[in-house]
Every structure is written in structure tokens, then in C-alpha cells.
Amino acid sequence: MRRAFLYKIFLLLTVSFTVAMPAHAEDGYEAWLRYQPVVEQKLRKAYQQQLRAIITEGNSPTLQAATGELQRGLSGLLAKPVAISEKLSSNALVVGTPASSPLIASLDLSARLSMLGNEGYLIEKARINKRNVTVIAANSDTGVLYGSFHLLRLLQTQQALDNISISSAPKLQHRVINHWDNLNRVIERGYAGLSLWDWGTLPEHKSQRYVDYARINASLGINGTVINNVNADPRVLSDQFLQKIAALADVFRPYGIKVYLSINYNSPRAFGDLDTADPLDPRVAKWWQERTKKVYDYIPDFGGYLVKANSEGQPGPQDYKRNHADGANMLAAALKPYGGIVFWRAFVYHPDIDDRFRGSYDEFKPLDGKFADNVILQVKNGPIDFQPREPYSALFSAMEKTNMMMEFQVTQEYFGFATHLAYQGSLFEESLRTETYVKGEGSTIGNILEGKTFNTKHTGMAAVINPGTDRNWTGHPFVQSSWYAFGRMAWDHSISADVAADEWLRMTFTNDKKFIEPVKQFMLASREAGVNYRSPLGLTHLYSQGDHYGPAPWTANLERPDWTAIYYHRAAKDGIGFNRTKTGSNAVAQYPETLAKQYGDLKTVPEDLLLWFHHVSWDHQMQSGRTLWNELVHKYYDGVEQVRSMQREWEKLESFIDAERFAQVKALLKIQERDAVIWRDSCVLYFQTFSGKPIPAEYEQPKHDLEYYKTLARTRYVPEPWHPASSSRVLK
């Protein structure tokens, strides 16, 4: 009795200290799975009364993972150990499937569960053997796992459990993250350390970090990971690496995550087995059938291949005068006996076209309906390349007979790497809710991806994410928020950026509204701030080449015109912007009639897309009453002020969170302000050389001339990303 009493006193003191002193040091490793004690004592007591024990019937690795997560989470959140019990008691948490749990089966939930598919779940109050319980029920163990994370999220965000009744199922089938990790552990567009995959110690050593990576993704319902770069090294298909990848698959499997691989299209040649990779050559088809069988021998639940072909120097079927459907379908046939999928990227643009904007559409639209049913066309959200703002890729409303999935970018290639705060949830929401009108109102990008608009067989969403060996996974703590938002929106594309940000802040920092409200507001504005101080009003691709970090709107005379900045902005004395109307490249014709008319008319085009579609006079009157020149200047200056506002708000919040993360974000915001000023001054001074107009006197004048900023761009040191060339080595 005395020992139990002393333990309770110790636990109470520990919890009281944690509640009273929220600013303990944290490094972000736990991401949003921190499971800190619920601060509100009344609510915590209610949770303690409602969740007194965990009862799990069934012992699969996935159910064990779910039960372990619940015990870990509840014990932390409720500030007291929560036991796993074999005996039913009042106010227990009962988890399982009708197949594994007689207790769940006794509730006769089959009709409702049948509507939720293989990954959905129910969370609700129930009565079993005259005892009040809380139930997490699903058709599969993976569904139970997802439901377990949902329940923990409710507690982390302080939602009441009284009369709870939740039914949830994913709207998209394939919710996949793409790593751009190279086999030497360097990450292309990775800004948080080396690759997670320590190839030198695999398969023998399975790091706990791999397990925690799986937990983080499973908490969002992410069910697939492509673990290597789309600029793929052929060696990834060798026995040496397949043994190592199989070990990772073993770690991920209990968490419902399938492994996919990016492949090099010239692999039959790189292995020295053939002198061709022509997809219509029977020898090539046989080679891929045999190699694919080998992959499945190592990884029985392997997901499939991701392919970047005939893009940026990567090999592909066009090298043999074949088209993308020929190439994709050959791989699809090799995967089909095992239920595998081909994700075929639509990121293609050839140097001989007049407008890179048109490239992907013009190449893939004629192939609509010609892809195998286990091929999914993976399309970037915009027609160029993950720019801060783009119109949607016209392929989404054009490929009515082709499976398609979205490709977003979480790693901040064009948003300041791991030094700028730029919550991408706002970009995701803007894209997913874009109305295409292709089948009338309601034909949003989200509904197209879900298969509602075109009734496609396979659906999905992918994100290039690139977490690394930094303790907090993403470098900047707030990049985690974009990872979180992607996962939540991949599960349900109707979830708003606001809701995702609110959940993430509560789980990652604190439930205190005095912290949440101001931070959420500047999070939601941060993407627009990044647009404003980089490329407002539809400008794009003003970055220095190679690093994609700082401004270089003057970039010209490169190997390809569409790698320069001047190709896109086309600034001249008469105005600025790319004419994509009928009198220009006519890229507007790729869109459904309603949007083509809207985008093609200078009077109706949204101003944030203005310079994407029109070459506009510097004196053009904007909605604000300003001229285009003055509006452009205003946007650049407003972007800097938005960053300064973020700084001021963050300074007020030191008492709400731990000192380590507060200091890190404070320092990064200072860097962001410095960079935003450089972006602003570089672009305004450069475009001024064409407009010939002054910067209005009310604005803070640049401290340096244009030549200073050009010199700064040339001397800036940002590590160049590593691009592997197509290998000619013989591999076995």
C-alpha cells in the first residue's frame, strides 16, 4: 500500500511539473506523437474514467503495433499507466476486427463496416456484456491501427469522447510518399541531413528510427513509400540492395506501409544482360518479368515501380521510338500477376517545344485510354515544377480514361529549403479545391483524384518528402506541418489547411489557444508570403539554377532556354508576362472551355495567375487601383512585411513552448527575413530596368544596387544537388 501510495505521489508530482513547466527541452524527434499529459485536469480525469484498460483480441504484428501505440499514447496522455487486459471490464477500450475479436463480432457491425473498405474504421461507444466500453473496430488489422491513431489524435487535441461515434475511410487508395534518396545517402532536394536508409548496416541492423518513421506515417494513414530517387540508380534492383530493402519492408509491414522502388528504364542494359531496353522487344519484357519476380521473392507485398522516363536526361521508351504507354504497359504486365502498380510520372518537357507549359499535356493527352489498368499517371500539381503558385496541370481535367494521382512537394525545394517557414497545407488545399468545370460544377481536382469525376479504377496522392537524419526529421520544425497536412488530405481531400494546422499545432506544441491562434494564422499566411516575396502575380521560375534557393530573375544563356528565368517572365519595356492566349502559345486551350475563357481574358483572369497567361503593360490598371508596376512592387514589399509580422508574433510566444524549438524557429525567421529582403530588392531592381518606373517613396528603398545582388547570387554557397547519370556499369 505504501509503495503504491508513493508511486501515485511521484506520478502526480511528475505530471504537475510537466503541466506547470511546458517549456522543457524538445528536439522534434517525436513529431506529432509526443503524447504529453493532458493539461486540463477535468478532461484528463474524464479520459481516465473512459479508458481504463486496453483489450485486444488477436496477435498479428499490426494488432501488436496498434496495441503498443495505444498503451504508449494513453499512458502518456492520461499520466498514468494503462494496462493491456484479457478480461472485459467497464470503460475498457476494445479494439479489433470481427474476425479476430469475438467481442467485436458480438456487436454485429458487419453492415456498417462493409461500407468502409479494407482500411476504414469505427470508433464509438458500445455496450458489451452489460459493460460500457469504447470500441475501435475495422475490417482489417490495418484499419484498427488507423483507428487507434485517430483516437489518440482526439485525446491529443482535447476532444470529448462522450457519445463518440466516428466512421472514417480513406477517399484515395494510394497515399504514398516519395523519397529522392540516392544510394550514397545523399538526398536530392533534401535539407535535413543524410538519407534515413543506412545501407552499410542493413539488413542486419534495423534502426529504431525506421520503426518511428513507420509510426509517423501510419498515424496519417500513409500506406506506401518509394524509398529511392526518381533519378534512379539501377543497382537498387540488385540482390545486394533487395536484401536490404526487404529488411525495411519487414519493419514497415506491421504499419500498413508497402515499399515501392524507383527504377532506371535502362536497367536491362545497365546489368549487362541486354543491349537494349526497347519495351516492345520480347527479351526486354522477359527481363523485367524475371527481375520483378526476384523483387517479389524478396518482398512478397512489394507495391510496384515509380518511373521517371525521358525527362531531364533519364532514359525511357522514347529512346527506342516508343511512347510512354508502351513503356508503362510493359512494366505493368510484369507487375500484374502480383497485384503491383506502375506510377508513371508525367514530368516531361522537351527542349524543342515553344512553351514548356504545354509539354506534359501535349505528350500525354493523345495516350488517354491507352495505359494498362494498373498504371497510374503521377502528375505534378502544376504544369511546370512545384513553383510557389501554379495553375493546375491541365492533364487532370483531360485524361478521362486514365488513372491519375497528384504529386505534391513537401520538401521545400522552391520555398527556402529548411530555413523558411512556408506551410504547404494552404497550397494543397488551393490545388485540391480548384474547380475545373470539366463535368460541370463539382469537378474539383480532389474529386477527379477520388475517381468521382471520371470513375477511374485507381486513385492516389503522392508527396516528395525527404526526411533525413536530422533529429527532427525535416530540418525546419514547421516543415513537419506540411508532411502532416499532406497525410491528412491524402486520407480525406476535403480536410482544410486550417484544420490540419490546428491539429498539428496542438499535437506538436500545446493546446493553449493563446499559442495556437496566432501561430495558425501566420502558418496559413506563410505560403502566400513566400509567393509575394518571390514571384507574385503569376511570375515564376525566378530562381538561381542548380540550387533553386535564391533570386536570379536575370538568368539567361543557359543550355536550354526553359532553364532560364527570362524564358518565363519575358520582361520588356512594353510589359511583363508570358502570353499563353490564342495570340501566344495558346496553352489556355488545354483547359476546359469555362476556364480557358476565364484565363484567356485579361479582364477575368485571376490576378494571382495574371502573368502566367498574359503579357501585360506596366501601366495596366489592377483591381487595387494601382498600376501593374506599383502592384508588383507592393506585393514584393508585402511579402517581406508578412515575414516580419511572423517574427513579431513568434517573439510573444516564448513562454508557451520549450526553449530549444522556440530559439530555433526564432533564428530561422531571422534568416527568412534576410532572404526575403534579398528576394524583394533583387527582383524589384531588376524589373525596374524594364519598367523604367520608380519605387514609390513610401517603401523602404533597397540598400544596394542591382549589381550587388547579382554578385551576391554568384557567390552564394548552397550545396548543389547530386544528379546520378544513367549508369553503364555491369550489375548483378
Image (tube, rainbow, N blue to C red):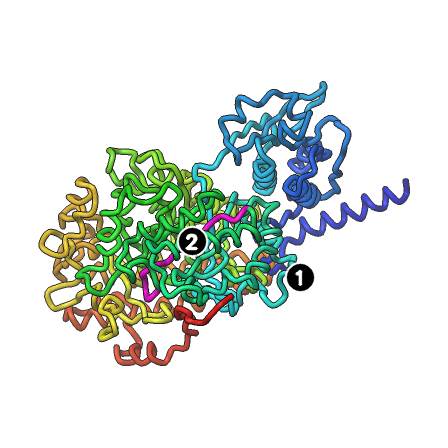
Identify which residue is drawn at 59% across, 47% down: 253
Left or right of 342 on screen, residue 32: right
Does the rendering let one see residue 586?
Answer: yes
What residue is pinned by disc 2? 286
State the mark number for residue 479: none
**Amino acid under disc 1:** Glu
Residue 245 x, y percent position in the rendering: 56, 57
Residue displayed at 50% across by 60% down: 237
Query: 211 or 296, which is in the foreground?
Result: 296
Segment tinted magenta in the rendering: 301-314
Residue reaching furthest top?
A: 130
Which numbered marker is on residue 204? 1
Instruction: Examine the structure image and report whether residue 325 is included in the region drawn in magenta.
Output: no
Based on the displayed image, in which of its 4 quarters is residue 189 positioned? Answer: bottom left
Count neighbours of disc 2 (C-alpha within 10 A) and say few if under 14, some if 14 to 19, many if 20 or more: few
Where residue 489 appears, as percent x and y from the top left, is: 44, 43
Query: For numbered disc 2, what is the local secondary structure?
Result: helix
Answer with the quarter of the image where residue 631 lies. Answer: bottom left
Question: Which x, y percent locates residue 77?
Answer: 66, 43
Is residue 312 shown in magenta? yes
Whether label 1 touches label 2, CB < 8 Å:
no
Q: Estimate the spatial distance between the alpha carbons at disc 1 and disc 2, rounded to whole Å.
A: 32 Å
